[in-house]
Image (cartoon, grey):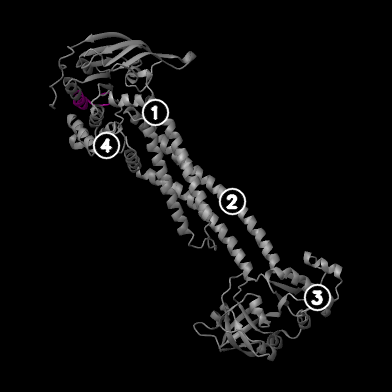
Amino acid sequence: MSFYEVVRFALRGLSANKLRSALTMLGILIGVAAVILLVAVGNGSAKAISARIEALGTNTITVMSSNRGGSTNTALTKQISDALVDQTLAPDVKTVSPVVSSSATVTYEGTDHTVNAFVGTTPGWFAASNTPVGEGATFTADDESQGRRVVVIGQTVATELFPGVDPIDKQVTVGGSLFTVVGVLAAKSSTGFQDANDTAVAPLTAVRQVLTGYGALNSILVEAKSPDKVDAVQSEVATILNQRLHVSSTTAATSTSGTNTTPYRIQNASQLLATQTQTADTFTTLLGAVAAISLLVGGIGITNIMLVTVTERTREIGIRKALGAPRRVILTQFLIEATLLSVIGGALGVAAALIGSSFQIVGVKPVIVPSSIGLALGVSIAIGLFFGGLPASRAARLRPIDALRYE
Amino acid sequence: MNRPVLEVRDIKKIYGMGEATVHALRGVSLIVERGDYVAIMGSSGSGKSTLMNILGALDVPSSGDYLLDGVDVSKLADRQLALARNRLIGFIFQAFNLIPRTSALANVELPLAYAGVKPKERRRRAMAALETVGLADRARHEPNQLSGGQQQRVAVARALVTEPALLLADEPTGNLDSHSTADVLTVFDQLSASGRTIVLITHEPEVGDRTKRLIRLVDGRVVEDTRQSPLHQPPVGAFAGRHSI
């Protein structure tokens, strides 16, 4: 009996019970698709976290005052900020952007919008904080020194105040003064609960004049010349700050390890990145566990349906043996059936996972991990073949009369 | 015609161990000549089904020899055994045992497929076999669309399609009403008349009466062996049915 004939037998065997074949394939499909999608969702959220942290800028450090409302001589001032621009003491610093921030109500033609973060800073901030302008332009150093009332608004502000209107060159009222909109920020992915697009950026001098007054700065954003210089910049900045704020160097040494003995706090984006890498590692472990469990569950499902399918047909195997089918032919037929079911089911599972991954799942855009496809497909086909082939070979080895009596 | 189709010598079959040992066959010897039409009768538990399964090479005896067409079946490996079942024996079951959800034609073609016959030739011979049992018009029907008698006739067609030396039937009319029984027996009579060797099991006297030779089994032993009609003449029931050959 030729191989081609056996294949035809297998196909006829599959089509003789379409519902059972379809259900078997469905079981395999779900097993494979679940593994691939779960891994993809996990991978997607890891990627999303990584992207958000990278959006903060990887080569910057942020200096913040740690004692709120404390004595004024330890507050961060414009003078301190200026002192950080020092080629000899801090050669690795690229830009220094003093930042003041407060919430403010922006009004345009009777429409009010309260901006969470109305930021006053210098032009260097846009590049340092990885906040590019979408349309229009940033304000210039000249605007900043002249205290011109210009503002760059975030996407949320633009849609709230200027629905269907180009906001460039429109005038808005902030704190009783008119500001001219010169640009709109490019959309930014939100880091947490706050909408990163609900912001407006204006020259430091103008914001201090109109909104915050000439008190302390909220923070200073220091950009290093390259990502690997971040640690150097951090120590240079710490040295200058300690000198300026009269902190002894012994306590300063502990500042980076998180104790609150210094009047300032330095947040390092590369530290965040390291934390993120750790998080990603934890995620990978978690994913591995999830994938293993879903593979196990999917595998048990496949095992189950294959065992049932073949056991149910033990009698048929007995009939075939009584009619003179050699063991090899029966085994080949059932192995081909199992292969077809697993391969078609697995392929459909991969297709389903690929289609499913194009949708957002619980707010996460899944990113397929190619190796998970191979793993899921390989394991399910192996399980399908093994648990389809094993009972078939057992039944084929039975005496026909025992197979026929099997209920 | 000097070599018998089947010859069994002192066959014993023991099931179970120790206390629960059951002696299904306690030494049966039997020779069936080519062209014979034998009925094996016996009450339930007399070992007739066990004997039949051994004759059909579906089961193996605990001891004793079984020569099928001169070949010692107990010495055959799986491959040759499959070949023997395929070429030498046509087995008809009480429960029909057609492959479900598969057309009558495909069921009849199955033994030919295992014999390696080409599809075209297979179809022709399967149709011819169905014609013999008078079911050519039901070739495309699946088993569950056929009556019991029709299913059994499909099973008969399947058994004889390979032109085996021996047709074995295990209570072929056991599950059938009287009308279907008559249909199936007519087919047997015609097959016997055309020279086929048939051995069947039955517990119905009217079935046994139509055969050429009657063997009675009691408690795993042959107690009676009667020749009812001559070996080389058609059986009494032949040509009484509706179908002609």
Question: Disc 1 marks which amino acid?
Answer: Ala
- Which residue extends farthest top? B223
Between A12 and B169, the one nearer to me in the picture: A12
Q: Are marks 2 and 1 on the same chain?
A: yes
- The chain to which mark 4 is attached is B
Question: Disc 3 marks which amino acid?
Answer: Leu
Question: Which quadrant does the N terminus of chain B fall into?
Answer: top left
Secondary element at tag 4: helix
The residue tagged 3 is A241
- The chain to which mark 3 is attached is A
Using a 10 Å C-alpha cutoff, classify the residue at mark 3 as few (fewer than 14 neighbours), some (14 to 19) or many (20 or more): many
Query: Is residue B23 toward the left or the right of residue A218 in the image?
Result: left
Task: Tell me: residue A23, above or below residue A235.
Answer: above
Look at the image and give the residue range highlighted in magenta: B173-185
- Give the residue drawn at x 39%, y 28%: A403
Between B75 and B149, the one nearer to me in the picture: B75
The residue tagged 2 is A288
